Image: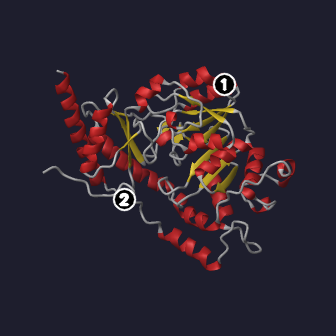
């Protein structure tokens, strides 16, 4: 009888005891609002910002309600206005173009490579079409950041990094989020730290930081921030920056602080699971792995492979067969959005664009979550099941072609 996986692809680990105790302390005193502090009290959210800024080596940090809010705030803080055009990845998740639409701007999609990173040749060709790039490190894949910045600097493009999938990752030793003008992170349950919802924004630019803090709804209480510029910067922007409330609260910040302190350990655990799946799938006929560059320190919290140039029916059959054996795969090539999967042509609030090279790649991307509740043996079993089902469908295709 064929083996079947019985684990859950959506079950997270329990929060660490230190996070639970910190949350209980906040609930006991009841001061959940970030600015509701007693004399001399620093507040969990302010401490979280200070600690994350130090962790990634940034001057300033702001904790907000979600990663999507962080991205829209970053766009507003750098001056993106109604009708502006913003470059972004064709392969990404809906909150990324959604953040661009939220500020009244228009996304200009840049293609994807077989390494699942932004197509730098396509970026160079489109560099004269916008002054901002919202760069999505989609599913944790970092492009050649040195080359990307050469293109953007030469064209006068400001880069915002969407690091929802790369908290803890780095390119040539530089932390993800520290290359562009702004880095945005998500703390949603399926990301690398879990507060249900939440986001973080980092920058070294004092005026961007001040505008972001005002946008988040600081009510002129910016002096209570520990990772913020001085009051003279706020004096320049406070009367012209609207309040678009999206603060993080002290409860979520309390939950996050112990998790961030343990991030490097968690990254090592994710990568061990990723590598177990990768080893089990290597050299599977018909299946292409996404090889990781030596310059990249990645976080393997999800796994992707390519069934390039397969027909849609055969890919759907692989998805169905794996599901029957307990392995939950998502397909980014599906014509209809499903759960978190969608393609650039699904976002019909954006101008229709043609990206035939990317269409070929998107049609073959298969995606899988790798929660830390999986053991290494689980990951080896999952790889065996995928290998078996891909092999069976691939052989049927080969046989039919003869």
Q: Nearer the viewer, residue 183 or 211?
A: 211
Mark 1: few/some/many CA within 10 Å (<14, 14-19, 20+): some
Q: Quadrant of residue 38?
A: bottom right
Q: Is residue 212 visible?
A: yes
Answer with mark 1 or mark 2, whichever residue precedes in sequence.
Answer: 1
Name, please, the residue furthest toward the bottom. 28
Q: Nearer the viewer, residue 174 or 358?
A: 358
Question: Mark 1 — residue?
Answer: 129
Q: Disc 1 and disc 2: Cα gap in Å?
A: 44 Å
Residue drawn 76% across the image and 59% down it: 218
Mark 2: few/some/many CA within 10 Å (<14, 14-19, 20+): some
Vertical comparison of 361 with 331: above or below? above
Query: Residue 400: x and y, percent?
Result: 18, 26
Q: Secondary structure at mark 1?
A: helix
Q: Nearer the viewer, residue 181 or 134?
A: 134
Q: Quadrant of residue 81?
A: top right
Query: Residue 209: x and y, percent?
Result: 74, 48
Mark carried by residue 360:
none
Question: Mark 2 — residue?
Answer: 373
Q: Secondary structure at mark 2?
A: loop
């Amino acid at each position: 009888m064929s083996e079947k996986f019985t684990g859950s692809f959506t079950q997270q680990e329990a929060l660490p005891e230190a996070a639970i105790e910190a949350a209980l302390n906040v609930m006991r005193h009841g001061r959940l609002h970030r600015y509701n502090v007693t004399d001399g009290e620093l507040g969990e959210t302010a401490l979280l910002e200070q600690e994350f800024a130090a962790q990634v080596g940034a001057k300033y940090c702001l904790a907000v309600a979600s990663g999507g809010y962080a991205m829209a705030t970053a766009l507003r803080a750098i001056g993106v206005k109604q009708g502006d055009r913003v470059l972004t990845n064709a392969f990404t998740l809906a909150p990324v173009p959604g953040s661009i639409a939220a500020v009244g701007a228009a996304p200009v999609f840049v293609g994807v490579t077989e390494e699942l990173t932004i197509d730098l040749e396509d970026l160079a060709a489109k560099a004269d079409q916008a002054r901002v790039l919202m760069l999505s490190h989609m599913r944790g894949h970092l492009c050649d950041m040195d080359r990307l910045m050469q293109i953007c600097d030469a064209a006068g493009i400001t880069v915002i990094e969407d690091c929802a999938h790369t908290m803890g990752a780095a390119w040539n030793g530089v932390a993800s989020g520290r290359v562009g003008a702004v880095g945005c992170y998500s703390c949603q349950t399926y990301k690398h730290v879990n507060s249900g919802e939440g986001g973080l924004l980092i920058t070294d630019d004092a005026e961007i930081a001040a505008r972001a803090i005002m946008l988040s709804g600081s009510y002129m209480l910016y002096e209570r921030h520990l990772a913020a510029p001085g009051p003279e910067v706020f004096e320049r922007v406070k009367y012209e920056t609207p309040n678009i409330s999206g603060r993080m609260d002290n409860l979520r910040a309390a939950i996050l602080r112990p998790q961030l302190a343990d991030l490097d350990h968690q990254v090592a655990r994710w990568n061990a699971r990723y590598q177990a799946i990768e080893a089990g799938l290597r050299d599977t006929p018909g299946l292409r792995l996404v090889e990781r560059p030596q310059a990249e320190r990645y976080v393997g919290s999800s796994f992707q492979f390519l069934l390039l140039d397969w027909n849609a029916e055969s890919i759907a059959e692989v998805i169905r067969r794996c599901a029957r054996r307990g392995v939950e795969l998502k397909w980014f090539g599906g014509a209809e959005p499903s759960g978190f999967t969608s393609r650039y042509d699904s976002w019909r609030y954006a101008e229709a664009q043609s990206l035939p090279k990317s269409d070929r790649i998107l049609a073959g991307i298969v995606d899988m979550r790798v929660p830390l509740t999986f053991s290494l043996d689980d990951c080896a079993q999952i790889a065996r099941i995928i290998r078996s089902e891909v092999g069976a469908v691939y052989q049927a295709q080969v046989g039919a072609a003869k």
